[in-house]
Image: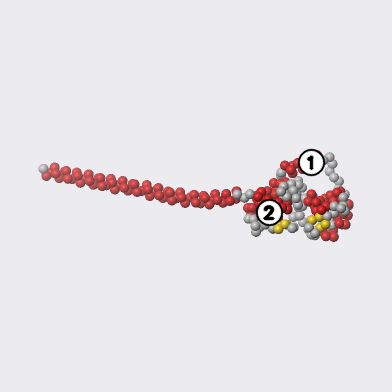
């Protein structure tokens, strides 16, 4: 009788011990996945923050509206279609993007610099936008018209030199290197804009449209372009 009771008690204690062990293991398992999940969630929350910063920077760059910048800062002088002073659509306007960036940043002639108003990315976007005028359909049409012309105009160098000496050398120097310096590599005014300046005047310079005929004005513009 005693042995049976002893066995029964022992088995009861053993089962109780097993139940407590299983319960404690179960609780441990229940805690670990939660902790692991919590750690993963924190890591996953941290990663998008860096990703968000990068995406914000990309969005900021992509938000630059070069057309809007041109309308705000350039259209007043260079025209809505970029065909005024100088004519960006003129096939002869072959200024590099690097020179345009320099002109926008530091200014050129009567144009002020914009490096304090615009950041580097905005200035680059503006320069690219200006270059696009030269690749426009309007520019391509001009090129086609030039190809259709039967003969190229023959320039009379002696006539051009005498006209320059008489009407221009007094202010611009005999070699054309003064106010502005036509011999400077950075001087890249188009033939059209030079003709317009000679004809109607520009700044302190009077117009010569009443003194010179079209042929003489064209010769002068050509000669200045050769300096």
Residue at coordinates 38% horizontally, 50% vertically from top-left? Answer: 35
Q: Horizontal placement of 209 versus 64: left or right?
A: right
Give the label, 2 or 1, closer to the camera.
2
Residue 220 spot, x, y in % from top left: 84, 52
Residue 54 spot, x, y in % from top left: 54, 50
* Secondary-structure class at tag 1: helix
Give the mark, 2 or 1, whose residue is nearer the N terminus.
2
Residue 50 spot, x, y in % from top left: 51, 51
Q: Quadrant of the N terminus?
A: top left
Q: Compare residues 171 and 212 and report the one nearer the observer.
A: 212
Q: Horizontal placement of 170 versus 137: left or right?
A: right
Residue at coordinates 81% horizontally, 51% vertically from top-left? Answer: 195
Residue 168 spot, x, y in % from top left: 84, 57
Residue at coordinates 23% horizontally, 47% vertically from top-left? Answer: 17
- Label 2, on which residue? 73
Q: Compare residues 54 and 75 and report the one nearer the observer.
A: 75
Q: Disc 2 to disc 1, how far (Cα)?
A: 32 Å
Residue at coordinates 37% horizontally, 47% vertically from top-left? Answer: 33
Q: Compare residues 210 and 87 and report the one nearer the observer.
A: 210
Would you place residue 109 above or below residue 4 in this image? below
- Label 1, on which residue? 145
Circle 1: is it few (<14), some (14-19), or many (20+) Cα within 10 Å? few
Task: Name the image quarter holding residue 148.
Answer: top right
Circle 2: is it few (<14), some (14-19), or many (20+) Cα within 10 Å? few
Q: Residue furthest left?
A: 1
Q: Horizontal placement of 177 versus 31: left or right?
A: right
Residue 2, disc = none
Q: Is residue 59 visible?
A: yes
The number of discs equals: 2
Q: Is residue 161 visible?
A: no
Q: Quadrant of the C terminus?
A: bottom right
């Amino acid at each position: 009788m005693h042995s049976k009771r002893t066995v029964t008690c022992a088995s009861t204690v053993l089962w109780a011990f097993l139940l407590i062990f299983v319960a404690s293991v179960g609780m441990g398992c229940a805690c670990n996945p939660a902790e692991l999940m919590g750690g993963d969630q924190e890591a996953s929350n941290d990663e998008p923050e860096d990703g968000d910063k990068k995406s914000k920077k990309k969005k900021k760059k992509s938000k630059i509206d070069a057309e809007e910048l041109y309308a705000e800062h350039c259209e007043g002088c260079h025209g809505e279609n970029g065909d005024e002073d100088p004519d960006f659509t003129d096939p002869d306007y072959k200024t590099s993007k690097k020179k345009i960036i320099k002109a926008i940043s530091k200014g050129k002639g009567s144009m002020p610099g914009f490096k304090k108003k615009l950041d580097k990315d905005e200035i680059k976007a503006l320069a690219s936008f200006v270059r696009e005028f030269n690749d426009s359909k309007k520019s391509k049409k001009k090129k086609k018209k030039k190809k259709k012309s039967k003969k190229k105009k023959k320039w009379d160098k002696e006539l051009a030199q005498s006209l320059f000496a008489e009407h221009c050398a007094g202010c611009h120097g005999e070699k054309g290197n003064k106010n502005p310096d036509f011999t400077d590599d950075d001087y890249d005014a188009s033939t059209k804009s030079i003709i317009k300046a000679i004809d109607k005047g520009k700044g302190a310079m009077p117009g010569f449209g009443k003194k010179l005929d079209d042929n003489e004005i064209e010769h002068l513009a050509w000669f200045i372009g050769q300096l």
